[in-house]
Structures are given as structure tokens and as C-alpha cells.
Image (cartoon, grey):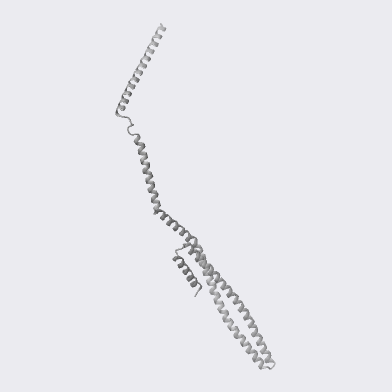
Amino acid sequence: MGIFSRLTDIINSNINAILDKAEDPDKIIRMVIQEMEETLIEVRSSAAKAIADQKDVERRLKRLDTAQADWEKKAELAISKGREDLAKGALIEKSKVADMADHLKAELDQLKEALGRHEEDVIKLDAKLREARAKKATLQARQKTATNHVRVRKNLYDNRIQDAFERFDKVEQRLDRIEGEAEAYELGKGESLADTIQSLETTDEIEKELEALKEKAAASANDNKAEKKTSKKSASK
């Protein structure tokens, strides 16, 4: 099973468990990122071990190559000394070392292949992790907006709000009664018809008296003018 298949199974399993419990969606976001971070650490650790194993196999191969060269020199030396039996034995040992080297080469190829897969997994997983972190803020903002919307809707349809408005209505009704009582005290205290007529009569009398005063003042002024003219004529004689 590939690393991503296993990671998907783990995440899906945990998400389903969280959804079954109706837990906070923010927990799902954090859980997904945490699983990806832990998996990335695991993949890097496996890659590091593969690199170390590869270096160890390469060192052992070098030693085996050196051993093969040594056994070949020993076989050549034995042949030069006329010891064919020793040369044959040296070649047999060289063959054994060559077989060991072939096994190590196969192991090295497997390590290189595994390391290549690890490298691909690290690159892909690291990209997905960056993408998940980038989406985290957006998802959290959407969650906050949705949560606030739900809270507002609950408040709008909460019976306590309706009760509060009913209390407001009762307060308004009480104020209406109090204001009505205040207005009732003023009933009958307005100006009657007789009072209005009397006021008109009084106004007429005042107007007449005012006109009389004006006429008197005008007559007095005319008398003064006449006296002044008479005085001037007497003075001129």
C-alpha cells in the first residue's frame, strides 16, 4: 500500500469518527494537517534510512570489488608459480565474492528504487501540506462565519426575543394609559363659546377706545398747528 493510500485511509477513518461525534470542523482541519505532518516526518525518516543503507551497501560493494581483485591477483600468482590447484581455489573464492557482490547490487537497486519513491512521496506530500495550510485560514474563516450565522438565526427565532418584544408592547400600553390620563385632566378646561364671544366683545371695545384716542391725538395736533400759525401772523404785524 502506498504512503498516500495509507494516509488517506487514516485521515478518512479519523474524519468519520469526528463527524459521527458531530465535533468542531476546525478539529478536522487540524487533524488532517497533523496527520500529513506526521506522515511527512515518517517518510523523511524512511528516506534517511534508505540513504544510510545505500551508502553502507556501496561501501561493502567496494570492499567486495577489492576482494575480487585480490583473489584474481592470487590466482595469477599461483599460476606463475605452477600451483594450478591454488589458482583454482583463488578463483573459487573470487566467484563467491562475485556472487555476494551481485546480491548487494540487487539490494542496492532496490534501495535506490525505494529512495526514489520516498523522494516522490516527500515532494507530493510537502506540496499537499502547503496547500492544506493555505486553505486552513479560509476554512476557519468560513467556519466562523457559519457559526456566527447559526447563532444569529437561533437568536432571531429564540422565544426570549419574542417575550422581550411582548414586554415592550405592554410598556407601550401602560404609557398610552398614563398619557390618556394626563389628557383627560385637560378635558373641559378649554375656552367655552361664551368666553370666546366675550373675548370678541372685549376686543371690539378696545379697538373703539383705541380709535378714539387716535382721533383725540389728531385733533390736538391740528389745534397746535393752528395756534402756531396765529402766533406767526401776530408777530408779523
**Residue 149 occupies quadrant:** bottom left
Pinpoint residue 161: horizontal percent, then vertical percent.
40, 51
95 in relation to 174, above or below? below
Instruction: Out of 44 and 184, give the one closest to the viewer.
Output: 184
Pinpoint residue 120: horizontal percent, then vertical percent.
53, 72
Residue most extreme to the right: 81
26 in relation to 102, above or below? above
Pinpoint residue 150: horizontal percent, then vertical percent.
42, 57
Instruction: Out of 200 and 118, give the one closest to the viewer.
Output: 200
**Residue 177 occupies quadrant:** top left
119 in relation to 29, above or below? below
In the rendered view of the protein, which quadrant contains the C terminus?
Answer: top left
Q: How many marks?
A: 0
**Residue 62 occupies quadrant:** bottom right
Pinpoint residue 125: horizontal percent, then vertical percent.
52, 69
Q: Residue at x 64, y 81 (%)?
A: 63
Instruction: Out of 213 and 161, give the one closest to the viewer.
Output: 161
